[in-house]
Amino acid sequence: LTVITQNIISIFEGDDERGVEAAQCITDHTRILVAESRGTELMTMIYDDPFIRLLNLLTEKRRDQIQKTGISESLIDFTRDTTRTLFQVRSKRLGGESSCLPPTHFSLLFILTAIWLSAFAISTIPDLDSDGLPSNATRVMFSLITTMFVIFYQFAIDLNNPFKGVYQIRRSGSAAQLLQNQMLLMRNPMFRGKISFFDD
């Protein structure tokens, strides 16, 4: 995506209208990756795929280039091929992500946690002291079990949504690439103030 972003800046230099459209395609895809769900990404692929829009813009630019010079610029062809490769990468990523934890996993985890903690609390009732408080060892054990379940639950959420989770265990390389794209586009004078990374 970063290579395509850099190429778009070069290809559409001097063609502000199409350049802004192409940059908006990249920003739309970046926003979907960072802030939206898989469902939203799939619906966007069906109705308004940023890669299809980008390929259409590159095809128009290639057609104009051939009409003017009689040959196609190799950078345009390379960018089109790279965009096609991104289609395949996206399909593999979505396939891999679909094997993450289903919603029933979270329901089951919540029910088992509630049962476990309730059973533990009930089992400590016979050991209460004269003030109605459990022993220090029981308190420590209850705290450890509760902490373990909370951490496990948060890791499970991270697996399903790495950009919004607490630990973000699968995100670092992807986030760096996406932020690099954002900076490339936002610093370029041709696109400054004309594209949006956020829903308006």
Image: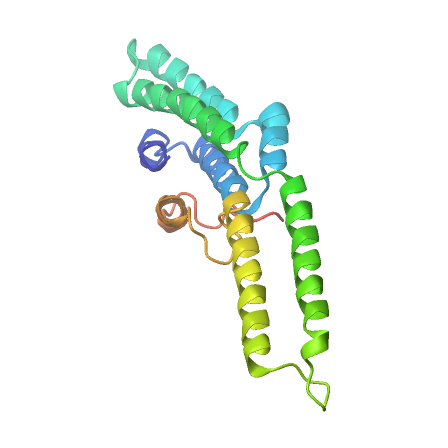
Q: Nearer the viewer, residue 150 or 40?
A: 150
Q: Is residue 72 left or right of residue 96?
A: left
Percent x, y of residue 145:
56, 64
| Residue 107 relative to residue 48: left or right | right
The relative height of residue 87 versus residue 178 in the rendered view (above or below) is: above
Measuring 50% from the left and 41% from the top, which residue is drawn there? 33
Q: Position of residue 8 (x, y in %)?
A: 36, 32
Count how many numbered circles sit on residues in the image: 0
Q: Is residue 66 visible?
A: yes
Name the spot of residue 116 as percent of width and height, x first. Answer: 66, 59
- Of all residues shown, which one is farthest toward the front? 126
The image quarter in which residue 130 lies: bottom right
For the N terminus, give its image quadrant: top left
Residue shown at 38% from the left, 17% from the top:
62
Q: At x 70% / y 57%, what residue is drawn? A: 115
Q: At 29% across and 13% down in the image, what residue appears? A: 69
Toward which corner of the image does residue 84 lie, by quadrant?
top left
